[in-house]
Image (cartoon, rainbow, N blue to C red):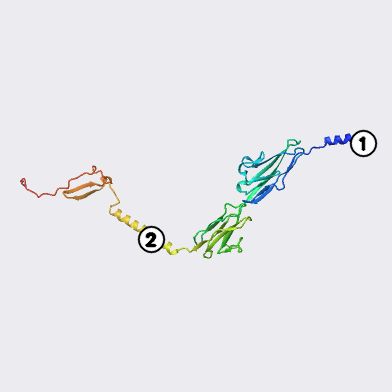
Amino acid sequence: MEGTSLCLPIVILLMQCSPSVPVTVSTTRHKVEVEEFSDAVLSCLFRTERDPNPRIEWKKKAKEVSFVYYDGRFRGPFEGRATIDGATVTLHKVTQEDAGEYRCEISASLDTVSLGETNVTLNVLVPPQTPSCEVPASVVTGTAVQLRCRDQQSVPPATYSWFKDNKKISNPPRHANATYLINSQTGILEFKAVAKEDSGRYSCLASNGVGSPKMCEGKDMTIEDVNITAIVGGVVVLCLLLLVCGCGGMLLHRNGLLTQGPRGRSFWISQCHGAAHISSQTLHRTDDTSNISYVPPPQEPQDFKHTQSFML
C-alpha cells in the first residue's frame, strides 16, 4: 500500500513533464503530374495535439502568394471548380495556369506548436500539338540546308523525328559519311551539302510521352542542278553591255560632246525671222525664259561699192 502511494506521484510527474506533440502536417505526394483538363488531387494530412478544429489554408506561390482556400471557401480562379475533403484539395479540369507550387497551412491555436505546413508541386502535362515544319521548296545542289520542326505548346518539351517519303530518317545516321544531322531536341534536320537524291517529301513527328504524337503535313523539297549555261550567258551579256557603254563613252568624248568650256558652248537655233544665239550655260529645265539672251544673226556681207577714188 505504501509502495503504491509512492509510485502515483511519480507517474503524475512524468505525465506533466512528457513532451507535447505539436501539430504535424504531411502529404502523400509532394509532386503531382496530371494531364491538362483532368483533375489534380493535392493531399494534405494533419494531426493536432488538442485543437479539434484547426484553421486550414491553401496558398499558391508565384511572383506573389495568393490564396486558394481561405476562411472556409475557395478564392479567385479556384472558386467553383475545386473541392476539399479534410485538408486535401481537388482541382478540377486543370490548365497550364494552375501549374506551380502550393502550400497547405494548418493553424491549431490550442496546441503548443500552433502552425504546420507542407508543400505540393503541380505539373500540368500538355500532349504534343501539330508541329510547324519549314521545308524549302527548291534548293541548288551542293548548298547547306536546314529543315525546321517546332511545337511550342507541349509540356514537357517534345522530341522530334524526321521522315522522307513516309520513311523515318535514321538518327544517328547509319553511315559515317552521311551528309545530314538531326537534332531531336530542337527539331532541326541539317544537310551539309544536298544532292539530287535528297529530293523528296519531308514531314516531322513531335512526341513527349503525353497523349498521341502529332505529325506535320509533308512538304516537297526539290534539288536542282546549277544552270551553267544561264550563268555563262549572263556573264557574256554583262561583258557586252560594259563594252558598248565604254565604246559609246569614248566616241562621245572624242566628238567633244562630253566636254564643256568654262563659259559654256553656244548654239545657233534657226527661227522664222532669223537665228537666236543661246549660251549653253542658260539652258536648263525651267519655264522662266528671262535668262535667254537674243543675239542678232551675223549680217551677210554686202556688195562692195566704190565710194572714194584713190591713186596709186
Q: Is residue 275 visible?
A: yes
Percent of width and height locating residue 230: 42, 63
* Residue holding disc 1: 4
Counting residues from the N terminus, which is met first, the one under dot 1 or under dot 2?
Answer: 1
Q: Residue at x 37, y 60 (%)?
A: 240
Amino acid marked by disc 1? Thr
Q: Is residue 141 visible?
A: no
Percent of width and height locating residue 142: 51, 61
Which sits in the foreground, 183 or 213?
A: 213
Amino acid marked by disc 2? Val
* Callout 2 secondary element: helix
Which sits in the foreground, 4 or 242?
A: 4
Classify residue 69 by image quadrant: top right
Q: Residue at x 67, y 47 (%)?
A: 90
* Residue holding disc 2: 237
In which quadrant is the N terminus drawn? top right
Percent of width and height locating residue 36: 62, 51
Which sits in the foreground, 16 or 92?
A: 92
